[in-house]
Amino acid sequence: MAFAFFFPGQGSQSLHMMDGFEGIHVVRDTFQEASDVLGEDLWALVNGEDAAALNTTTTTQPLMLTAGIATWRAYQQAGGVLPSVLAGHSLGEYTALVAAESLDFATAVKLVRERATLMQNAVPQGVGAMAAILGLDDAQVIAVCEQAAQGEVVQAVNFNAIGQVVIAGHAQAVERAMVLAKEAGAKRALPLPVSVPSHCALMQPAAEQLAAYLQNIDIQTPKIKVLHNVDVQSHVDAAAIKDALVRQLYSPVLWTQTVNQLVVDGITQAAECGPGKVLAGLSKRINKEASCVALTKQADIDAFIAAQ
């Protein structure tokens, strides 16, 4: 059976999110490896009570990468069959590349810490914002953003599911877009608790710096096909993969299109590999033919393997 693995991104993190892997040594070892790279104890952070520290962008990004790879390694150790294709939501794309053996794990941990730092520094605190628009179609959200811009930046940046689009840009432009979205019939327009307006034009300076950083990063041809956020395509050479990662910073995450493309390709089964159940939930909303289970604990992995 052909199936896909999805890797979650920033926003799926939570305290004690690895509790379901108690006694699975490869999970703890993976966290130790990342902690040694960064010089801080990520395992203690996950198992502590400091949610603010956990949710800091520069910590969250390497933490979610580590959690995703720890889950992936637990799946491999349990004897799971390799998926036919991988995809990751935003930051999760880096996790997918590590799982595909395109990117070394320790290198990726440092890379996503650098990515997070560049993103955080690109826009001063309070200048940018993000919001979720629920109940409008993609074209309506794009039109609302165009009307709300008024010389500032506000764009549709995450096409997460039918009727669920995230916008990002200058804080005041995002606020205007939220008002216009409600006037256009949106069920809800919710500000998101983030400090970085990801995947919009305000990330262009960060993307240029990331491109320079990536020049010294070794990337191999993926051993498992990876669908990229920016174009819903798989790439095999290092230059094309690096270009996709750079463009991802200031371009929309085409998640709805990714799931639909997999269904077109005949892949209707998937597993979300890492904390949370966001991508599993989105799959059901995107395409009725798509089925995705969340592997948030060892018992989930065992059940998924048993059904293979």
Image (cartoon, rainbow, N blue to C red):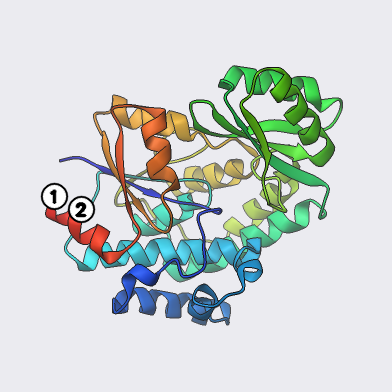
Q: Position of residue 101 (x, y in %)?
A: 35, 59
Give the residue at x 74% y 44%: 129
Identify the residue position indicated by label 2 in the image. Answer: 304
Q: Is residue 265 above or below residue 11?
A: above
- Residue 69's quadrant in the figure? bottom left
Q: Position of residue 42 (x, y in %)?
A: 52, 76
Q: Nearer the viewer, residue 222 or 52?
A: 52
Mark 1 residue type: Ala
Residue located at (81% from left, 55% from top): 125
Q: Is the Cβ of the residue at disc 2 closer than 8 Å to that at disc 1?
A: yes
Q: Nearer the viewer, residue 86 or 24?
A: 24
- Identify the residue position indicated by label 1 in the image: 307
Query: Does residue 170 lie above or below 144 as drawn?
Result: below
Residue depicted at 44% across the width and 29% down the height? 257
The answer to whether 247 is drawn above or below residue 103 in the figure is above
Q: Is residue 154 visible to the viewer in this orientation of the structure? A: yes
Per the image, label 1 sits on a secondary structure element best described as loop
